[in-house]
Amino acid sequence: MPKAEQRESTGRNAFLVGLGILLSRIVGLVRQHVFAHYFGLRSDAADAFNQAFRIPNFLQTLFGEGVLSASFIPVYARLLAEGDEEEAGRVAGAVAAILALVTAVIVLLGVLATPWFVDVIAWGFHGAKRDLTIRIVRILFPGAGLLVLSAWCLGILNSHRKFFLSYTAPVAWNIAMIATLLGFGSRVDESSLALTLAWGSVAGSALQFGVQLSVVLGLVRRLRVRLETQLPDVREIIRNFVPVFISRGVVQISAFVDGMLASPLPTGAVTGLANAQTLYTLPVSLFGMAVSAAELPAMSSALGDEAQVAAYLRQRLNAGLRQIAFFIVPSAMAFLALGDVIAAALFLSGKFEARDATYVWGIVAGSAVGLLASTLGRLYSSTYYALRDTRTPLRFAVIRVALTTGLGYVCAIPLPLWIGINPRWGVAGLTASAGVAGWVEFTLLRRTLNRRIGQTGLPASLVGKLWTSAAVAAAVGWGIKLFIGEHDPIFEGTAILAPYGLVYLGITWLFDVEECAGAVKRLARLRH
């Protein structure tokens, strides 16, 4: 069994993952701010770019980080733990060759089939808007292929516990897009800018892959890139890959459903959804992904009999759930109570107006419904993957998508008409219904895993303390908002959100929440 002191090491690894994600997300928010400055919210070109980006991103998500984390890392990390560098190099090279070949074929087919994809995912787009979406997709597809190879690098780096580089590499991609926007934003019309930005994205994908590759080549000294599909470990990865691929595909279908249901809504719904997802995925990545990414290699390296492994996984899972909840609960409360302040501080500029910030608030408030379930569910899925079980999460993902599709349609399209509100607000009902489906999936994941390894989950007392602390902090934030009135959005955001965070920390400290003490200690170490 891994030594007990590895808990501290994993905590440090989770911190490095979170720090790397934070840096890349900050630059990503800058990119989104610049995008909003030049395109605004009510723009056909902005809708076309955001919807187009979903299609090749499907490829990167399917073959990228999530699938490799579930299928490749457990096998590769085990080989490293056993000291078999020769076999580890052969397996890594075989996976790279398979990914490169399959991705190249899919990119080619994707470029050829782009009009069909657009007619499915953006069925509400017509005329010039549809044509622009098709052109953008065809440019973006090769960049998505490079991001798949970048995800292979991430799998290698994470298995070697080199977390910081793998999660800061997207900074290069974001910088390339920011540079493109700043260089061409005031020189061309919106449609031309959307096409140019797509090329900037491809260049950024190449940079993201390149900054990781040099380090990977130094770590995997016996790397041999060959199609060695007969290796037992490679076959195990392929066996694990298929159900995870389908599972991720099912989840991505859910994301596509969101886009499809938003496309016939009034102009701005697709871009508003994209802006809200930028906010929503920030805490998911910072906290849910950080803890899950750090825990998966450690969980996968556990050795011992069935009872020992189960006890070890329970310990790690429960500690990880507490870490995630400590940060996700205040994030969800901030989206619900102060989403307009957050959206204005990040996006209000140029063509993006104050009313657009309110619109994004409504969408992100809907997303907050399932925020905690999504992040906790990610860690539960990682535990299944560490047990080499990739099929159970797939079954529950199918249920989630079925619920998302049915509830999403009702809440996005007929419900606004039934209750007599503007149809553009249907996208807020869409995100809220997805949150409900996320809670169903999380409940199924937890119940089934508890039968296998024993009781896991968050204590009710802790949940109550966290939500109470967040609610009091939100009330303080609202009081400050009413007191200071309307100001510069960045000043207003700082004046409201900083006290919000401090009050939350203070109350959880008074409640003696141990994760608060740990967070304060890490902040103190950063100061020194």
Image: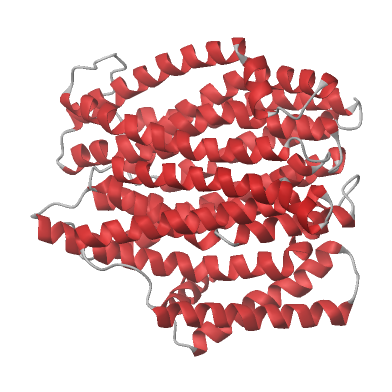
Near-viewer residue (506 or 216): 506
Residue 346, horizontal then vertical, whole percent: 76, 55
Q: Is residue 48 above or below residue 325?
A: above
Q: Quadrant of residue 48?
A: top right
Residue, x 70% and y 32% (percent of image)?
51
Residue, x 67% and y 22% (percent of image)?
118
Furthest residue to the left? 305
Residue 109, horizontal then vertical, whole percent: 54, 11
Near-viewer residue (360 or 312): 360
Q: Is residue 25 above or below residue 178?
A: below
- Indicate how the structure is coloured in the image: secondary structure
Q: Is residue 512 above or below residue 104?
A: below
Near-viewer residue (198 or 45): 45
Residue 412 placement, left or right of 295: right
Residue 402, horizontal then vertical, whole percent: 49, 43
Residue 68, horizontal then vertical, whole percent: 37, 35
